Amino acid sequence: MKKVVLALSGGMDSATLLGFLLSKGVEVHCCNFQYGSKHNAYEFHTFSHVFHFYLINGFRDKIDAHIFNLVNTFKSFDSDLLQSGGAIPEGHYEAESMKQTVVPGRNLIFASIMTGLAQSIGADTIALGVHAGDHHIYPDCRKDFIHSLNITINFATEEKVSVYAPFLDMNKADILKIGYNLTPQVPYQYTRTCYKNQSISCGKCGACQERLEAFKLLGKEDPIEYER
Amino acid sequence: MKKVVLALSGGMDSATLLGFLLSKGVEVHCCNFQYGSKHNAYEFHTFSHVFHFYLINGFRDKIDAHIFNLVNTFKSFDSDLLQSGGAIPEGHYEAESMKQTVVPGRNLIFASIMTGLAQSIGADTIALGVHAGDHHIYPDCRKDFIHSLNITINFATEEKVSVYAPFLDMNKADILKIGYNLTPQVPYQYTRTCYKNQSISCGKCGACQERLEAFKLLGKEDPIEYER
């Protein structure tokens, strides 16, 4: 693993994975996907902040950014997470209503594009920050899917590219713990997790709740601002 | 299999698969991907011709078209098939030089987007016209890949979507035979196979040569015009 293509949303999981990979001396090509989600504009903002943090903190020769505009690709897709969908449900991340926020095929599409990019630039790995907390709601974050995806990508690339998802068995608190122990610490003040279309995180949607619980579990204060 | 999402390039294989699916009474959602290949503009032309043929020949309630603009997604990908790449090699389809026409991750990306669309519109199947002639050069057309892709898509969609690739063990002559026996016959006069950036097919690139051999094997005359 020398050159890696990473899906970087600017959320705490992918930001931690970026810090983790850089700490191992790996060259990281960060991909951000604009796909028409309600929070895409804010996600892009946090992606830029996180990316820039590492750029100016010793890793300018080790990171690159690739932005993919998939807004039209997802325009007829059915999900409340998209601008075309209904309101984002509030409540716990694992509640049944959160299933409306599944975006069909999303991780498969992202991983496929990352695979094509990886092969084009000679990277041997695509890295995804999926974790155990995602498993209940999102089929394309589960272990069976990720393992099968790895085999499919191996076949597609004649074994030149593999999937790396080191957080697959961890929860968000485990991930935070890794990030706080890295040097430099992962800049959680620049990350954002909220699903809503607003600059200040709501603190009420499933994604915010899961994040807040992770900080609480670790006994840390979440450095970002919340509406509530 | 009631509602299917089909990758329709406008080549003879996918056109035959469209005719075959419609003959079975299936509702077919045809996807065309503009990804910056040298022949994309001409491919779009043939896609439209083939689609329109079925539209006016009794299937207007059974087909729909979805156009995906992926030109920017593929812009940094490395392949001679792309407008950004080198010249298209001439010679036999299976020659080593044809490997330069592999587009990294292409079928994986197309299938992933088709999966998201399928789930969004309630289709249970994505259909691909990949065939045995593609196996030597293109890893993302081989049986192992297609079978693995099917499992991965099953996991991604909680078994709501599967891959259908009925030509996987056939060559182009077998496919032509199916198309000529359908009612209506597949309109091969509207299809196009050439990899080059020109309106009249070159007859010299690997794709043209494979097509011409298939018609010859079947004892039919290819109804399209060639440069040579």
Image: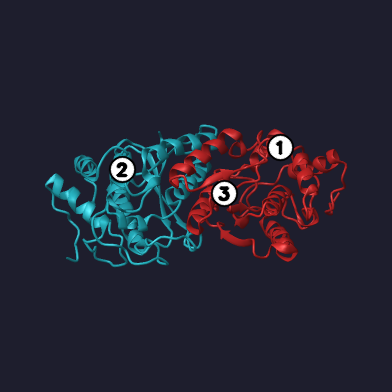
Chain colours: A red, B cyan
CA–CA distance between discs 2 and 1?
A: 41 Å
The reply to whether the C-beta atoms of the residues labelled 2 and 3 are less than 8 Å apart is no
Categorize mark 3 by other alpha carbons within 10 Å: few (<14), some (14-19), many (20+): many
N-term mark: 3 or 1: 3
* Residue at numbered disc 1: A170
Quarter occupied by residue B85: bottom left
Which is closer to the viewer, label 2 or label 3? Answer: 3
Residue B124 seen: no
> Does residue B101 appear left or right of residue A84 in this picture?
left
* Residue at numbered disc 3: A126
CA–CA distance between discs 2 and 3?
A: 28 Å
Across and down, in percent, residue A212 comes to 82, 43
Q: Chain of mark 3?
A: A
Quarter occupied by residue A183: bottom right
Quarter occupied by residue B99: bottom left
- Which amino acid does the dot numbered 1 rest on? Met
Query: Which of A6 and B173 lies nearest the eye of the viewer?
Result: A6
The reply to whether the C-beta atoms of the residues labelled 2 and 1 are less than 8 Å apart is no
Who's the residue at 50% across and 34% down the image? B154
Who's the residue at 53% across and 43% down the image? B120
Across and down, in percent, residue A98 comes to 69, 39
Across and down, in percent, residue B67 comes to 44, 55
CA–CA distance between discs 3 and 1?
A: 19 Å
Q: Which mark is residue B131?
A: 2
- Do marks 2 and 3 both belong to one polypeptide chain? no
- Which amino acid does the dot numbered 2 rest on? His
